[in-house]
Image (tube, rainbow, N blue to C red):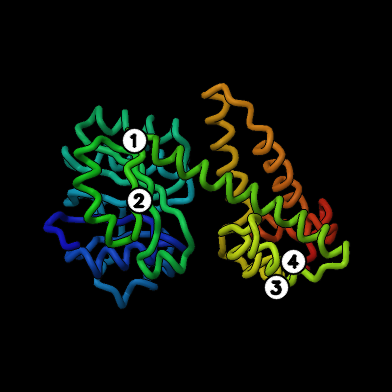
Amino acid sequence: MTTTQKIGFIGLGVMGGPMCRNMAERSGSAARAFDLCQAARDALADSRAVLVDSIADAVREADIVFLSLPGAAQVDALCCGEGGISSIGRRGLLVVDLSTTTVASARSVAERLTAVGMEFADAPVARTREAAIRGELSIMVGSDAATFERLRPLLGNLATDVTHCGAVGAGQAVKLINNALVFEHVAALAEMMVIGERAGVEPAVFLDAVSRGSGDSFVLRNHGTRAMLPRSYPERSFSADYVLKDLGGVLELTAQTGVSARVTETARAYYGELVAAGSGSRYFPVLMELAAGRLKPGDTSKP
């Protein structure tokens, strides 16, 4: 949907780059875009985005600034650190964080931006880079109702599903829980595929049979068939390091809510072993190799 609002976009990486491209192409706003990495900026040279040389250039005249950053520390520093958005943005600026952080971090940043007359919404995204390229993401928003109504048409340029989850922080809560469910399911599927194979069932046959029964799932059809079956775990996909970051955010939330999340604790230990085995930068379904005993702590070989 088009807009007359001036847009800034900071963070042009694996997900941010295609999101910024779609926002610039579809919103009618020549989004002013910045990333510390020159290669990330160059990748948008053929888009309608206006590539700028600094955070200040992306923020100073904006009505809305979208962020797509690695995590809570980067979002906090950019929003509230020295020379950050809180000191260079104008009053009334709306900051929309598309990153995955923590609930506590989102609420803390919102509080500090509100204190200087700005607004904040957490709007983490789900689905793959391919979905980001197509503009078919799912976005979970934490904001007040009025801010959500303002944002929903713009987020529609990036996503086919935009859900108002509640007040600030609720978007991050839903996203972290969503991710934990995926990570835990991948771990369970990896174990079951190994058990099936050692019981004499070919992995492709196993996945096909289970997909026809009550064990079918998104994880089986995507992570199972596209990564674990062909044993394809590319770099620059969602890594095991990021899995640990997100599981840490979920466990922080469980501590705050007084819930014992034993399955999530087990998953964190499992993925921690994967990182210790030297595969922290690889696509996280590589956990299949650990389940099969093909990776050991300290082993940097790549099956």
Task: Identify the amino acid type marked 3.
Answer: Pro
Residue 124 in the image, given as x and y percentages of width and height: 41, 48
Query: Of marks 2 and 4, which one's residue comes earlier in the chain?
Result: 2
Q: Which residue is mark 3?
A: 230
| In-image side of 67 versus 56 (left or right) | right
Residue 250 sits above or below residue 38 on the image: above
Q: CA distance from mark 4 to mark 1?
A: 40 Å
Residue 126 in the image, given as x and y percentages of width and height: 45, 54
Check the image and name the residue furthest to the right.
199
- Quarter of the image with the N terminus in it: bottom left
Q: Which mark is residue 206?
A: 4
Task: Identify the amino acid type marked 2.
Answer: Leu
Q: Nearer the viewer, mark 1 or mark 2?
A: 1
Disc 2 is placed on an element classified as strand
Q: Which residue is mark 2?
A: 67
Local crowd size for mark 4, using a 10 Å CA cut-off: few (<14), some (14–19), many (≥20): some
Residue 135 sits above or below residue 103 on the image: below
Q: Residue at x 70, y 66 (%)?
A: 209
Q: Which residue is mark 1?
A: 166
Residue 267 sits above or below residue 211 on the image: above
Q: Nearer the viewer, mark 4 or mark 1?
A: 4
Task: Identify the amino acid type marked 1.
Answer: Gly
